[in-house]
Amino acid sequence: MTSPPVQQAAEPDVLLRVTDLTKSFGGRRAGVGTRRTGQVHALRQVSFEVRRGETLGLVGESGSGKSTAASCALRMTDPDSGSVVFDGDDVGKMSHAALRKMRSRVQMVFQDPYGSLDPRFSVRRLVEEPLLVHGERDAAVRRARALEMLERVGLSAELAERNAHAFSGGQRQRIAIARALVLHPELLVLDEPVTALDVSVQAQVLNLLADLQSGLGLTCLFIVHDLAVARYVCHRIAVMYLGEIVEVADSDELFANPLHPYTVTLLLAAPVPDPDVMERSRRALDTAKPAAGPAPAEGCPLLPRCPVGAGRPDCAQRRPRLREVVPGHQVACHFPGEMQEQLARRAGAQSRTPTLGEEDK
């Protein structure tokens, strides 16, 4: 399924710009009386932008730094270095009052629909609460806006007085989306919003998000580990690996022409209904997988897992930087596109059918 269309001017109107974010966390103690382990580099010079009216996907494995990047972008966590600019204002230099005002313009939807909503409160109270926190004192206005938003996410007003514990996971996530949208935010951040849901419910929530994005013209930062999910709702995708962005492109371009070996691997790992394709992908991955080992200090962080960089001095000695290879398509790789070429040659050799004479020999 192709990504939703987005209208962009020649010079995109950027709502959120993140530049060179770096964040490290101290290692945890292994046990009582033991010393701390080394630092964990959660982000390494991460840069991206979210344009008005688009959905940008941050995609990667667990631990790749996606949620940390979003947390630093919203100043929920202070980065070690780097800058975040929201609608022209430097978030790192905002006063408490300015930061509070900004947060009324940015809302989040979290992964766990059970943990993010108080089960003792009615749905109406949960959706009204952001309005009250940000200064709306008129109870009638709060109620009307809450009921309107519940209807928008597919929940009737008749359900508004029920407590959250009476709803399923998919319904709770709809409530969380209504709660986030009731302030009419300019930026909606969704942190793995469908991961905790059943597959059929995931599809319903993704359809809802696609409809809301189109109908309300939302600007979204969508954090997810599944590239197929990102393709369905995102206009552009930024792929992260070990705290770095390794590839950025329009959704359709990324799927049609993945240039970074890690992106190719993520695409190959995605399940498809054709068992022959799955088997060829499995063999390609098994054949390409190198021996595990630590990443070089100065070289490419993917090197221990990368079939393209094995034995190449550039990959071992120089850390690749994100650069534009084709218009609108950036990649951090010394040999972009080479893994896709290798797999295409291998797939062609495997798919060649022997002639009758060859079978008789």
Image (cartoon, rainbow, N blue to C red):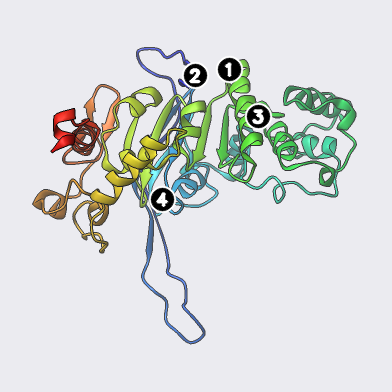
Q: Residues within 10 Å of mark 4 (few under 14, many from 20)?
A: many
Between the residue at mark 1 and the residue at mark 4, the CA separation in whole angstroms equals: 29 Å
Q: Position of residue 103 (x, y in %)?
A: 61, 38
Between the residue at mark 4 and the residue at mark 2, the CA separation in whole angstroms equals: 26 Å
Q: Position of residue 308 (x, y in %)?
A: 18, 45
Label located before the other in sequence (1 or 3):
3
Q: Secondary structure at mark 3?
A: helix
Amino acid identity at mark 1 = Ser
Amino acid identity at mark 3 = Gln
Amino acid identity at mark 4 = Ser
Q: Which residue is mark 3?
A: 204
Q: Are marks 1 and 4 in contact (CB under 8 Å)?
A: no
Q: Are marks 3 and 4 in contact (CB under 8 Å)?
A: no
Q: Are marks 2 and 1 in contact (CB under 8 Å)?
A: yes
Residue 19 visible in the snapshot: no
101 or 323: nearer the eye?
323
Per the rendering, the mark at residue 4 is 2
- Which label lies toward us, 3 or 4? 3
125 left or right, relative to 218: right
Q: Residue at x 74, y 46 (%)?
A: 117
Q: Which residue is mark 1?
A: 214
Q: Residue at x 18, y 29 (%)?
A: 356
Between the residue at mark 3 and the residue at mark 4, the CA separation in whole angstroms equals: 27 Å
Q: Residues within 10 Å of mark 2 (few under 14, many from 20)?
A: some
Q: Residue at x 65, y 29 (%)?
A: 204
Q: Is residue 160 above or below residue 32?
A: above
Which image quadrant is residue 13 in?
A: top left
176 or 286: nearer the eye?
286
Q: Are marks 2 and 3 in contact (CB under 8 Å)?
A: no
Q: Secondary structure at mark 1?
A: helix
Q: Which residue is mark 4?
A: 64
Label located before the other in sequence (4 or 2):
2
